[in-house]
Amino acid sequence: MKENNQMIENRLKRAVESSVPDVLANVLEQIETKEVHTTEAVSETINDNNNEKIRVLPGKKTNFQRWPRAVASIAAALVIVFGLWMNLSYSTEAIVAFDVNPSIELSVNRAEKILRINPRNDEAKTVIGDMDLKGVDLDIAVNALIGSMVQNGYISELNNSILITVNSNNSEKGEELQARLSNEVGSLLRSFSVDGSVISQTTARDNHFEDLAEQYGISPSKAALIEQLIAADPSIEYADVAGLSINDLNILIEARQPQLVKVNISGHASEKAYIGVMQAKDIAFGHAKVTEADVRDLEIKYDYDNGRLTYEIEFKSRGIEYDYDIEARDGSVIKFDTDGKEDVTQPQTESTQKTEAKTSSKLIGSSRAEDIAFRHAGVYRNQARNLETELDSDDGVRYYEVEFAVGSTEYDYEIDAYSGKILNYDIDYGDDDDDDDRSETTGSTARVTEKATTAATNQKPLAQEIGKGRAEEIALRHAGVSKGQVQDLQIELEYDDGIRYYEVAFEVGDTEYDYEIDAYSGRILDYDIDYDD
Amino acid sequence: MYVRENATASGYYFPDTSVVESRPVIKDKQRSDARCLSASSSWRTDMQEIENQIKSLANGDTSAMGSLYERAKSAVYGLSLSIVKNSHDAEDVMQDTFIRVYEGSASYRAEGKPMAWILRIARNLSLDIVRSNPAQELSLEAEWILDADSDFSESSLDKLVLKMVLSQLDEEERQIVMLHSVERLKHREIAEILDIPLGTELSKYHRSLKKLRGLLEEKTK
């Protein structure tokens, strides 16, 4: 039996609450005979001046917090009635999947009753909660699930896209169901005051999607949608878009208008979580140190880069062509190229000079640098301990300094930050097992597990960690906050039970966020949001 | 046809009469209720109310104790229990805590964190007991808790978790888990009360829950 943190905490809470002794009478009796001290009899007052912080609440969680209970009981009663009515046929007629970020699959029979419910990720389990949907009519289940998704903040004004996938071997019936569900979910969202956008598709049963899903850590329905996208636009790379959310994909589809088969889209994807074209443009101009008056041939379009939605901004100014990729949510400059004569105003001059010939000033990123070092050293990432990677620069050459240890051997690499070339390396075969630096984060038991699993991981292809930066982005994106709003950000790479994950904790105003993000797939394994007010 | 009027937003509160897949039915609703409470301004109202009760106590109005006690008793008891590890001493601490709250009510400075203040009092009183009597070891009353092993009803699983918390976690871990579970304090607030860095609190919290998950899985296999 698997219980999650919340279940365990609820158990503990109940256990304590049910065993609290009653001492009120004694307390009252005693205080009648006592007086309130006016002196500092109790010195444990809390002095905390750090808390005068600006309160910024993510807007998406403030609505839909409560539903009328009366209606709940009517619905509950109805479920029972439906339950009595049930005339179950056990063969699966179709599988209906809902993907927002939570990904839930419902197997339904011919009578459209739920035979099985399959949460494909942890968010889905949160959405399902303690609902028992087995034997329930599909339409009721859909109502319940969409309601819970809105209530849990997965569908909101910021993230309004949902993918409905009908997987059926009877394509005619499948498409009919697709259309019906799409309409229903659309109007359901409107009833929750969400101007939703519903992408719906019908697919045939195909194990191929399961394989793709496994490979990229996504759901089969999302895999099917991406496959369609790629079929329509072969320039799209699977790995680049797999990390995009359904909302991101929706925006991309809207921007590029690919010809998709048996895919229907109603409404428009919300762009409220993104900085917007105007701001993206200003960031690019600011970075390039040009003024709008000098700019010609401006072109802005949505693009994507390594699982992130971006604005691609191209323009010319004073004979130089600029090409920027701006991250659509936090506005960071992911990439920029210039073409033309030497530009003295170009930021990061030392790097642009070096990379002029390559026409790209894109850093390879620390995890790529680490992989290069690991490959050279002939070790697997999971074997490496005390991994530390820093972007450094020396005489105008930017490089990643990658340090790690395997057993008693210490490795130290310098990797060119743009070309990935190994500039220098040093291997120290020490005999002192000095591995205590990380004991705070990994713990001694974790290390044992790590060693135990090394043999298994050796057979696997080299997996790549997403890096702290990416983990941070995933958490911030999920939380719907921008980096500028965040305080006390802490990211640590943790290792537990064979799972390597990033623990990302931060605060926005008085709200505390705590995420566990799979270090390889970037999947959110668990999260906790504590609101104050 | 879709029966929207029957299954509106609230349609997802189905009675937990049976089980989705093989998953046990857990009242996650309690958690989400707690979330709802704290997600809205009622969290602040809640704290405001406690501060008002403390103020009334300071003015000699002992009738405010009843509601303050009801509001704070679980957290106070849970925290004491996590430190003293037996219900007898925890009960004493609980009683003393509310008396101290009364006595100290005049010196309480309203800063919006009355629960943290009360819990610090409970914690200090508990630590006093542990320090004055270091030999006091886990003395979980048999009839209260031990039957939990053989019987997997919901309430005894709850007790099993409590028992695991008290017997398998270290003192700091116990306090962290207890404060987070029972009072739903934020990690930052817990870190403040325990006077440890937030990062330490977080990693201890996660390690503890991981441990509990593993133990529970093992026990109920």
Image (cartoon, coloured by chain):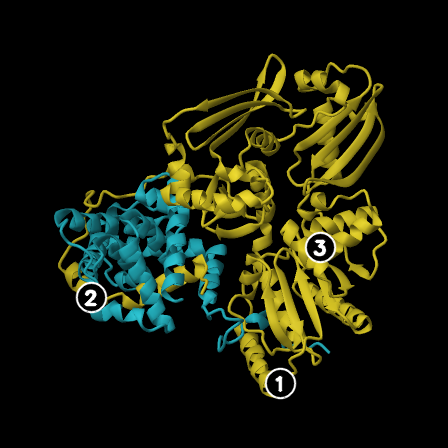
Chain colours: A yellow, B cyan
Q: Chain of mark 1?
A: A
Residue A160 in view of the camera? no
Circle number at residue A86 = 1
Q: Chain of mark 2?
A: B
Question: Dividing the image into 4 quarters, which one contains the N terminus of chain A?
Answer: bottom left
Amino acid of disc 3: Ala
Rate crowding at label 1 as few (under 14), some (14 to 19) or many (20 or more) other CA atoms within 10 Å: some
Q: How many marks?
A: 3
Amino acid of disc 2: Glu
Mark 1 → mark 3, Cα distance in angstroms: 34 Å
Viewer-proximal residue among A231 and B114 = A231
Mark 3 → mark 2, Cα distance in angstroms: 55 Å
Q: Image point 53% across, 34% down: which residue?
A: A379
Q: Which residue is mark 3?
A: A223
Q: Earlier in the sequence, mark 1 or mark 3?
A: 1
Which secondary structure lies at badge 3? helix
Amino acid of disc 1: Met
Marks 1/3 in contact by CB < 8 Å: the verdict is no
Q: Quadrant of residue A21?
A: bottom left
Residue A291 picture location, percent across and down: 77, 24
Residue B64 picture location, percent across and down: 28, 61
Look at the picture and state if A322 lies above or below A195.
above
Q: Nearer the viewer, mark 3 or mark 2?
A: 3
Q: Are marks 3 and 2 on the same chain?
A: no
Residue A313 picture location, percent across and down: 78, 33
Horizontal side, residue B154 vs residue A359: left or right: left
Q: Which residue is mark 2?
A: B141
Q: Are marks 1 and 3 on the same chain?
A: yes
Residue A357 in view of the camera? yes
Q: Quadrant of residue A290?
A: top right
